[in-house]
Image: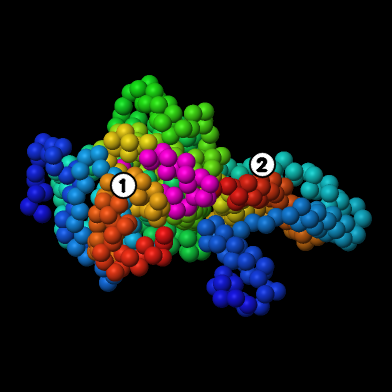
Amino acid sequence: MTQSNTPTTTWDDSQPIVSIKDLYKSFGDLEVLSGVSLDVMKGEVICIIGPSGSGKSTLIRCINALNDIDKGSILVEGQEVHSPDLDMLALRKKVGMVFQQYNLFPHKTALENVMMAPLQVLKEDKEEVQARAFDLFKKVRLEGREDHYPGELSGGQQQRVAIARSLAMKPGVMLFDEVTAALDPETVKEVLVTIKDLAEDGMTCILVTHEMAFAKEVADHIYFTDRGVIVEHGAPDVFFENAQDERTREFLGQIL
Amino acid sequence: MTQQDTKMSKTDLPVLLPIAERMAKRAAYEREVGIFSLRLKAQHGVWLAMLVLLSATVAQAQTTPGQETIFTVLWRWKAFLLEGFLFNILISFMAMAIGTVAGTLLGLMQISLMPTVKASSWAVTQFFRNAPWLTLLFFCMFMLPFEFDLGFVQIPFPDWIKAVIGLSLPVMANISEVVRGAIKSIPFGQWEASEALAFSRRQQLWQIILPQCIKRMIPPWMNWYAILTMATVLASIVGVNEVMTRAGQVSAAEGGRTDLLLPLYSSIMLLFFIYCYPIARLTIRLERKFAVKL
């Protein structure tokens, strides 16, 4: 962890925006990540796939420090995430996260959900935040739903509000943790379209997903994890057509 | 019988499943609210009213000619007794206010991330929750001074204030559990999502978690209020001039007429019923309303 004191200013676009090196993480006796390394450049879309329990979710949850790590290093814009002198607020501002269960705040309207963090955490100007929030509702194609409570929206709509809520913090990287896994098949598409729009706008996205067709379409790079290690990775066309490892082929065979 | 069914409930007799489910729900509720929960029904009031009438009539039949009728006696003391009852309600209001404020603080301490704060508040909660109410009342009566000397001003501490404090202690402990239970019942995803949005723990608690808890806390809170109201008569044992003490005075003033006792005390019970029944009904209505939401 020698880089822990690296100032943020040394980072520029030519370096990876997220850089994970030799990451280890155990829950009790269960080792979930056993030496994972990967780099994400700014504007890239990364998909992490693999059987359940292979450590995908833990991996991305380590990136915004929702989980701590045992060993290794994670740099976000050149700043060590798991150093004691980390500015947590700065990190959470840089890294947005969307969850499988949406986790919208049920006692607030959709608009309030989106505006809450910029207002209360970043202390930004209310009118400015509101204007940005309305733009975001347009972006996730939910105009007119601003005053609905989460309970009045469908799963797909809630998930898009959750995406807008994350974007309202103007993050540099977005993490998506199986965001379509809890959705009805007919609403999966609307969420995927939203993510695709984002990717096309140049947002750096790291997705854990089971949507292979989607991964193939939007990802710049695909990582396949199994039992805590990255078994294989590559550009989607190579990865899906020409998987080298036996485990990858077996997994793809089951899924596709 | 499939594996899943056995996992869901603790019985493998299918006919018992609905009952098992109901009991599980009840147990979950009682964990949150406390073992004692008020289930007053309108018929309880009818029974009480009948008890008053019946006991008065029976007593009436035994009076010697020339003596005042039971109803005349009760009617004569009505203002005196009602005033006592209002004092009970005042005590319950104050004990509830103190208990709620202190209990909320204690409940929040119970979810603290600091192990010492968490453990000590847990211990305090468990102690006052499980101590007999009357013991706590006596404790406050004899351990608290009759006045507080602040140097420049002396604050008198009459018996009834001590009773208020004594009654507020178990309320505090139970409200502490209600608060803790309500916070624990909020899905963990709410903490995570707000953490990922850079909210501080204090902001998470006050902006995200607690506003969602209030709805769930109102029914058990009202239940504890009703229980407290009925417990205020304990203050008579330590000599506070509330309705039970006054009933004793009435009985003495009437020359210790034994035929008066049953109608007298059952009419006080009726008084408490009339006050607590609407609270119990409202609690049940709120419970039903909030049970489906969230």
Indicate whether residue A184 is drawn in magenta: yes
User: Within 10 angstroms of label 1, few (less than 14), some, or many (20 or more) residues?
Assistant: many
Confirm whether circles 2 and 1 share one chain.
no
**Three-letter amino acid code at the position of disc 1:** Ala
Residue at 22% x, 65% y is A34
Q: Is residue B30 visible?
A: no
Q: Residue furthest left?
A: A2
Residue corresponding to mark 2:
B83
Image position of A195 (left or right of B136): left
Chain for numbered disc 2: B
Question: Residue B114 appears at what percent x and percent y?
Answer: 28, 55
Mark 1 sits on what residue?
A: A219
**A195 sits to left or right of B135:** left
Q: Residues within 10 Å of mark 2 (few under 14, many from 20)?
A: some
SS under mark 1: loop
Mark nearest the camera among 2 and 1 is 1
Q: Toward the viewer: B231 or A246?
A: A246
Q: Position of residue B251 (x, y in %)?
A: 72, 54
**Above or below, comparing residue B1 to residue A241 in the picture:** below
Given the image, on which type of amino acid does mark 2 rest?
Glu
* Residue sitting nearer the eye, A20 or B54: A20
Q: Is residue B171 magenta?
A: no
Magenta-colored span: A173-196
Q: Residue at x 28, y 61 (%)?
A: A243
| Residue A151 quadrant | top right
Depicted A226 relative to depicted A201: above or below: below
Distance in Å between CA atoms under marks 2 and 1: 78 Å
User: Marks 1 and 2: in contact by CB < 8 Å?
Assistant: no
